[in-house]
Amino acid sequence: MDWQEEYAIGIPEIDSQHKTLFEFITEFEKAVEGEMHWNTVQPLIARTREFVRFHFAVEESLMQIVNYPQFVGHRSEHRQVLQQLEAFEQRVLRQEAKDELVPMMSSWLLDHIIESDKPFGSYAQGFFRAEKNA
């Protein structure tokens, strides 16, 4: 899965982290294509989960700084994704479920960036412009 500039939300740190998430998905694609065993996939899921947790903390901190009005809903989406990742990680330990991971992660990432993060990026950019001009 490749990063496209149209996914950029205009906040360099968040865009950089989103690119890293795309790299994780590419690693998952390679793992699935190579039919890697769960003991290779599971640590990749754990690394991804921890990075996602970090990414969400950064996003949520920035949302609080700019007093983003959709913060509560956005944070709720983040919590749902983390719960899904944790549940998936447990399933992979019990069964071969890795084929489900790439579609789940790809769908979530694209939907989340386009539907939730882009509006936040626009809001935050407006906030910072207003602060700069004040």
Image (cartoon, rainbow, N blue to C red):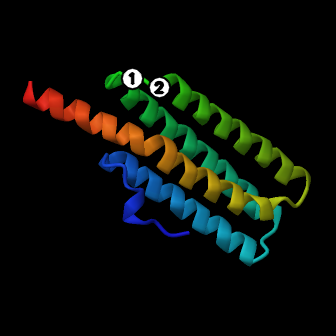
- Disc 2, SS: helix
Q: Which residue is mark 2?
A: 71
Which corner quadrant holds the C terminus? top left
- Residue lying farthest to the bottom in this orientation: 34
Percent coordinates x, y for residue 111 in the rendering: 56, 50
Look at 66% across and 65% down and name the residue there.
28
Tell me the kind of residue under disc 1: Gln
Q: Is residue 29 above or below residue 115?
A: below
The residue carrying pointer 1 sits among few (fewer than 14), some (14 to 19) or many (20 or more) residues within 10 Å by Cα, namely: few
The residue carrying pointer 2 sits among few (fewer than 14), some (14 to 19) or many (20 or more) residues within 10 Å by Cα, namely: some
Q: Nearer the viewer, residue 100 or 51?
A: 100
- Residue lying farthest to the left in this orientation: 133
Percent coordinates x, y for residue 69 in the rendering: 41, 23
Q: Which residue is mark 1?
A: 64
Q: Nearer the viewer, mark 2 or mark 1?
A: 2
Mark number, residue 52 = none
Q: Tell whether label 1 touches label 2 (CB within 8 Å).
A: yes
Q: Nearer the viewer, residue 6 or 18?
A: 6
Look at 31% across and 49% down and name the residue there.
10
Percent coordinates x, y for residue 20 in the rendering: 48, 57
Tell me the kind of residue under disc 2: Phe
- Disc 1, SS: helix
